Image (spheres, helix red, strand yellow):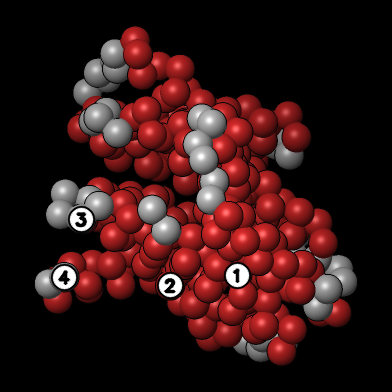
Amino acid sequence: MPLKHLFILLFIMIAHGSAFPVAKLALNNSVPPILMASLRMGIVFFILLPFWKLKVPEQKYVKSLIAFSISMGVMVYVFMNLSLYHSSIISPIIIGSQLAIPFGILASGIMLNENISNRKWFLIFSSFVGIIIIFFDPKLANNFLGLFFASLMALSFGLAQVYSRELRELDTSTLNSFVGLFGFILLFIISYFIEGDTILNIKNINLNSWMLISYQAIVVSLGAHLLMFYLYKFYTVGKIFPFYSLFPIFGIILTYIVFNEVPTIMFIIGCIIVITSVFLLNKIK
């Protein structure tokens, strides 16, 4: 792999890892979690709108596109923000997101009748064992709700990967525009009824929080994803996906720098088991 592509991969992994501490900073500034997810998707949609040009996808894509947009644009981001909102410790949430790969494989087996080899079953089991070890870390006694939402985030991402298989030939701008549109509208409505005072909450968002939300939308949701699609022109998914095991490492390093989170021995053991299991799952064809 050329050095240029390695640097692109490094940027993508750092961007994905940074999404969690950046989101927590915005939440600490009293931005409601569901509204923040809506605004993030809204920024993505309005940036992509000129490229989309309101093209309607073919009928054969509509069902999968709606399912993907809801699972990715709504469920993933809202559960991510809720997990961070209800947790005082960020690192376990980052590791919990790695369960998206085991959940995706399980969803493929159930929904698409894909065969799951014994080796994959073992690695899926070991990844959940790693999460259980982290779960019993005494430091997480008051963060169980956050871990629950992190599991739902990973499950939603796994489902999104299944739906995305039928959208491979769809134009990238159309796909991401629909994700942004669905996420923005549905999450805005949900925020209105659950969090309330939506307009007032938007007015109370300060400049720093707007910058943090914009970073998530532009750098993570757009920049990292579009660069990943660029790399897919040169490499197979199987070649790129194992690198996703790196982003939790960058995320944990950033949480230490920003929030001074010091991992416990139990967390480190569980973290190593999860990341190793997911890396090997990504390597198996």
Q: Is residue 164 left or right of residue 150?
A: left
In this rendering, does residue 129 appear at all?
yes
Looking at the image, tell me whether mark 4 or mark 2 is earlier in sequence order: 4
Q: Which residue is pictured at 16% across the width and 49% down the height?
A: 233
Looking at the image, tell me whether mark 3 or mark 1 is earlier in sequence order: 3
In this rendering, does residue 219 appear at all?
no
> What amino acid type is highlighted by mark number 2?
Leu
Please tell me whether mark 1 sits on a helix, a strand or a loop.
Answer: helix
Q: Nearer the viewer, residue 63 or 186?
A: 63
> What amino acid type is highlighted by mark number 4?
Met
Task: Give the distance between the C-alpha atoms of the residues marked 3 and 4, in whole angstroms.
Answer: 9 Å
Residue with the mark numbered 4: 1
Please tell me whether mark 3 sits on a helix, a strand or a loop.
Answer: loop
Looking at the image, tell me whether mark 1 or mark 4 is earlier in sequence order: 4
Few, some or many residues within 10 Å of mark 1 (<14, 14–19, 20+): many
Few, some or many residues within 10 Å of mark 3 (<14, 14–19, 20+): few
Residue with the mark numbered 2: 246
- In percent of width and height, residue 246 lies at 43, 72
Looking at the image, tell me whether mark 3 or mark 4 is earlier in sequence order: 4
* Quadrant (top left/top right/bottom left/bottom right) for the N terminus: bottom left
Q: Which residue is pictured at 46% across the width and 41% down the height?
A: 161
Residue 192 against residue 37 in the figure, above or below:
above
Task: Give the distance between the C-alpha atoms of the residues marked 3 and 1, in whole angstroms.
Answer: 25 Å
- In percent of width and height, residue 284 lies at 42, 58
Q: Residue 235 bears which disc, if any?
A: 3
Residue with the mark numbered 1: 274
Q: Which residue is pictured at 30% across the width and 33% down the height?
A: 168
Please tell me whether mark 2 sits on a helix, a strand or a loop.
Answer: helix
